[in-house]
Image (cartoon, rainbow, N blue to C red):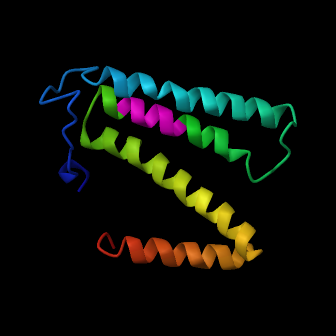
Amino acid sequence: MISKLPQTVYCERGNSMSFMAEPVNAVTNLAFLIAGYFGYRLLKNRIINSKELVVVPWMLMLVGLGSFAHHTARSSITLVFDALPIYLFILYALFLTLKELLGSKLKSSLVLIGFVVCTNSNVF
């Protein structure tokens, strides 16, 4: 199943499958690592005091590392490393937003589960 994932052709890469064929895409992922580091520092120094946000810097760093892996050594497996952390980050951000809007973790979870099921109905 993973080996059949579609691969997009970026103009930077062309048809090349060589390592670092997408240097700009690879280097721009440093922004995620830097943002994750500074987010971690803000939480560690208690400038931001939120238990729900503790995971966010780590998620940002995983987005950067996964995307770097895919844009340097492109394969179906690294595509999963690229897409999955982004997907999880978006879902977590949606959960936090819904929790603020609805005022309930349970309601937010149910709405999010419904969203995931409806938007991924062709996957299941």
Question: Which residue occupies 44% across, 26% down?
Answer: 28
Q: Is residue 11 above or below residue 51?
A: above
Residue 52's quadrant in the figure? bottom right
- Residues 121 and 77: in front is 121
Q: Position of residue 91 (x, y in %)?
A: 55, 60
Residue 107: say if magenta: no
Quadrant of the image for the N terminus?
bottom left
Magenta residues span: 62-69
Q: Position of residue 23 (x, y in %)?
A: 32, 20
Instruction: Assign the magenta stretch its main secondary structure.
Output: helix
Q: Position of residue 55 (x, y in %)?
A: 68, 46
Quadrant of the image for the C terminus?
bottom left
Q: Position of residue 50 (x, y in %)?
A: 82, 49
Question: Which residue occupies 71% across, 35% down?
Answer: 39
Residue 105's quadrant in the figure? bottom right
In this rendering, position of residue 27 left or right of residue 7: right
